[in-house]
Amino acid sequence: MAPRGVWCVLLTCLFCTSSADKDFFTSIGQMTDLLYTEKDLVTSLKDYIRAEESKLEQVKKWAQKLDVLSATATQDPEGFLGHPVNAFKLMKRLNTEWGELESLVLKDMSDGFISNLTIQRQYFPNDDDQTGAAKALMRLQDTYRLDTQTISTGELPGTNTDVTMSPMTVEDCFELGKIAYSDADYYHTELWMEQALKQLDGGEESTVDMVTILDYLSYSIYQQGELERALDYTKRLLKLDSAHQRANGNLKYFEYQLAKQKKVEAEEGLKEKEKREREKREASEKKGRPADYLPERRKYEQLCRGEGIKMTPRRQSRMFCRYFDNNRHPLYVLGPVKQEDEWDRPRIIRYHDVLSNSEIEKVKELAKPRLRRATISNPITGVLETAHYRISKRRATVHDPQTGKLTTAHYRVSKSAWLTAYEDPVVDKINQRIEDITGLNVKTAEELQVANYGVGGQYEPHFDFGRKDEPDAFKELGTGNRIATWLIYMSDVPSGGATVFTDVGAAVWPKKGSAVFWYNLFASGEGDYSTRHAACPVLVGNKWVSNKWIHERGQEFRRRCTLDESD
């Protein structure tokens, strides 16, 4: 057995987390490195186990040998020691060999493992990563209307049957419920505590006891105004632990509140009853919505699920696929690009096979080491800041509307990196290809931004261009507003991850190697508000994209302006 102190050190090392804000959960691409880190640690742990087993085997052999010897010797001690060799060997064993055995037993075999663990620990995720991944699961649950059983078993739409997935344990479900509870999100607390309870009732063994789960469950249900259900769970808890102090207090309080509520209901008139029922319905509709629920959130989530797409058959009949040579551009006369109409107003065009697999891998190779939490442009100051509403890796930044600086976008869960043309010929070729196909000058465009989305990676509804109430947006760049967006999909996404346009009800699904293009500004220079769009959460898969934001400067003779604001 390993000394008690060794295990204390092991546990301490395993559960200590780095204080650095790594945001691993915001990029699947970077999370893959953690799998190799864990694999290395498992190898190191197995080496440690083998070393301990080898040590114990030596001790076992020594014990067995002495067991036989001492059993024989003690039958006739004087006769045994009467032989001078036996007497010498006894002196030697007690003076030397037992000391060697003591050294062997005390020898710490964990040094190599502890050293490796200490080195690797600085790259471990921290509490924020665990919380971020948990909240991402709950966001996926809401957006795609998944029940907790589906998530717990891992049977998600688009899941590859070849991918190994271990179902969530009671402890996993309980942890999700606790994270929701710490945010006063009693809706998700209830869902995940109920799932934990269901799995316990189904016979799953767990270190989490039923009393603790029922305690969380009854309180979260009470917080949502369901007194009768809260009371039922409290009674069930007390059957298991009749001395539970908090539950006994809650029982009396819930019974008092329920009696009071029934008395009020009995005394109220018809109008009051109708009002109360209406309030209940409204509360039920709002159940589970976050405090910062966006007005367009319902439409956004519908489009992410493939619902509510507003394309009539008549409009669809005017959408075509074609070979495109951009007015007989020399590069595309013999090898035109495959162009497909995705939407008519605003006009969204997809270009197929614009990046090869080798180019995609090169871009990812260049971007991966420098992925950071994505940023957005502050509309007041024009400075890039981390975007907290975008969940992809650099962690996304947005323009802060108060300061104008780029800040972490908490509604964007991704990480991104910026690649310049001079870094590699592939990047230069991609930039030139964008210019050749669109006919726009990319010399004043922003650098190629590469983004990798994390667990539940998304970017909630936003505009790419600066609005009139953001006069200093992109001021630092000095190249005017973002006239157009070129978005390249660098991976297929088995489920989720669509780009949706919430104002017009359009959805564009990722297809590896293709790019979509649209103008953010009318030819007059006015912003096209129908281009408001979002990146839906990635349900299953690893989403890589790159985009080029093309600016106004340099387009004066390539896209001439008009006097009509809506042209």
Image (cartoon, rainbow, N blue to C red):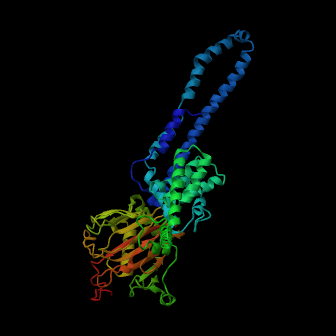
User: Residue at position x 54%, y 35% from top?
Assistant: 109
User: Residue at position x 64%, y 32% from top?
Assistant: 57
The vertical placement of 286 against 441, above or below, is above
The quarter in which the C terminus is drawn is: bottom left
Can you give x and y, in whole percent of width and height, for residue 242 in the image? Answer: 59, 45
User: Residue at position x 52%, y 62% from top?
Assistant: 263
Q: Judge by depth and name the residue closer to the eye, 482 or 51.
A: 482
Name the outermost residue toward the front: 267
Can you give x and y, in whole percent of width and height, for residue 111 in the image? Answer: 50, 36
Can you give x and y, in whole percent of width and height, for residue 70 in the image? Answer: 70, 19
The vertical placement of 325 against 14, above or below, is below
Q: Is residue 389 left or right of residue 168?
A: left
Q: Judge by depth and name the residue closer to the eye, 545 or 227.
A: 227
The vertical placement of 339 against 224, above or below, is below
Instruction: Answer yes or no: is residue 330 visible.
Output: yes
The quarter in which the N terminus is drawn is: top right
In the rendered picture of this protein, how many numbered marks are placed on residues?
Answer: 0
User: Residue at position x 30%, y 74% from top?
Assistant: 466
Can you give x and y, in whole percent of width and height, for residue 202 in the image? Answer: 66, 54
Q: Is residue 535 left or right of residue 483?
A: right
